Amino acid sequence: MPKIFRSSAVLFASTLVLLSGCHKGPQDGVVGTVNGHPILRTEVDKAYNAQLASNPQQTAPSADQADSLRLNILHELIVEEIVEQRAAKQNLIATDSEVDAKLAEMKAPYTEEQFQARLKTANLTLDELRRDIRRNLTQTKLFNKEIDSKITVTDGDVNNYFNAHKDSFNLIENRYHLAQILVTNQPAQQSSNLQNSKATTDDEARKKIQALKNRLDTGDDFGTIASNFSENQDTAPNGGDVGFVPESQMKADPTAYAAIMKLKAGQITDILPVLDGTTHKVAGYSIYKLISKEPAGQRDLNDPRVQQNIRQQLHESRSQLLKASYLEMLRDQAKVENYLAEQIFQSAAK
């Protein structure tokens, strides 16, 4: 069952810190601004406390870790505000009726008592959940208008892709089109996601993957989350797309195989452990999405499934690239003041 939770994971952490020693100091309680719109310390503190509360058995963070987490939360709030302001200019803010419809959809699997219990567990009020739903719907509407509506996949594109990958459509066994979000606890490994986000300990890895799962459960796009936070260098740039995996290969990981076999297209697994091939110890955590299942057999371009699959892959690939570029442009156009970053930098630099 999906968890109702809005996490405060890292989003574009490394590129939004603007340091300046020339401006006037911030007002009390304001930790940042976006085009003059204030972001309050209370917002950061609430998200910070919620993230700690989601892992009550973890040790308390050190002062440096706490500062880092608060910075990451503030960076996400900054990006959210940038996107919100852009959507407002385009008259794309989600309406109350749209929020109500999505909320009803989320409540449908539960009784009212169960729903309220899940809210309490996630340390969310109904108003806060409605705010998060509105944010997700607004972002979707903005991306649909500014990005997805501009993507065209022609018949020529499909033909060219098929001819370049014809061998991959001759299936000798069932295969599964998967996407993955991977978080490892290996500090030596590098990360190539948009956020340069990397867990370095098992505690950090578990916290990070749980935060990402919470975001997926409240409607965030799998590909966007994977691009920003997945630590798989090969798939993060493509929205976590692993491609088609033969069934025999999947059976090498019985836990993941069993979880994926229960999915319908579009569904995601729970958090799964990733074991080191040599030590068989937990080396990280992953979440899989089943995009589609392809039964064994020969495929040709006249097969509607082949054409649909190619169009979907080409569209998703272009969408992820354009989204990353679009957010970069919005950040460049916004005037951002990050007072918290300045305070931390000045304190540490003494």
Image (tube, grey):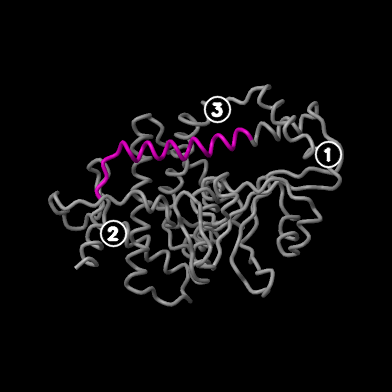
Q: Earlier in the sequence, mark 3 or mark 2?
A: 2
* Residue density around tag 2, few if under 14, some if 14–19, many if 20 or more, within 10 Å: few
Which amino acid type corresponds to the residue marked 1 in the rendered image? Asn
Q: Which residue is mark 1?
A: 170
Q: Is residue 134 magenta?
A: no
Q: CA distance from mark 1 to mark 2?
A: 57 Å
**Tag nearer the camera, 3 or 1:** 1
Image position, residue 310 (x, y; %): 69, 33
Q: Which residue is mark 2?
A: 42
The secondary structure type at the circle numbered 1 is strand
* Residue density around tag 1, few if under 14, some if 14–19, many if 20 or more, within 10 Å: few
Q: Which residues are magenta?
A: 314-337
Which amino acid type corresponds to the residue marked 3 in the rendered image? Ile
* Residue density around tag 3, few if under 14, some if 14–19, many if 20 or more, within 10 Å: some
Which amino acid type corresponds to the residue marked 2 in the rendered image? Thr
Q: Earlier in the sequence, mark 1 or mark 2?
A: 2
Image position, residue 108 (x, y; %): 59, 50
- Image quadrant where residue 306 sits: top right
The secondary structure type at the circle numbered 2 is helix
Residue at 82% of width from left, 30% of height from top? 300
Q: Is residue 149 left or right of residue 138?
A: right
Q: Earlier in the sequence, mark 3 or mark 1?
A: 3
Residue at 55% of width from left, 53% of height from top? 217
Q: CA distance from mark 3 to mark 2?
A: 40 Å
Q: Which residue is mark 3?
A: 151
Image position, residue 170 (x, y; %): 83, 39
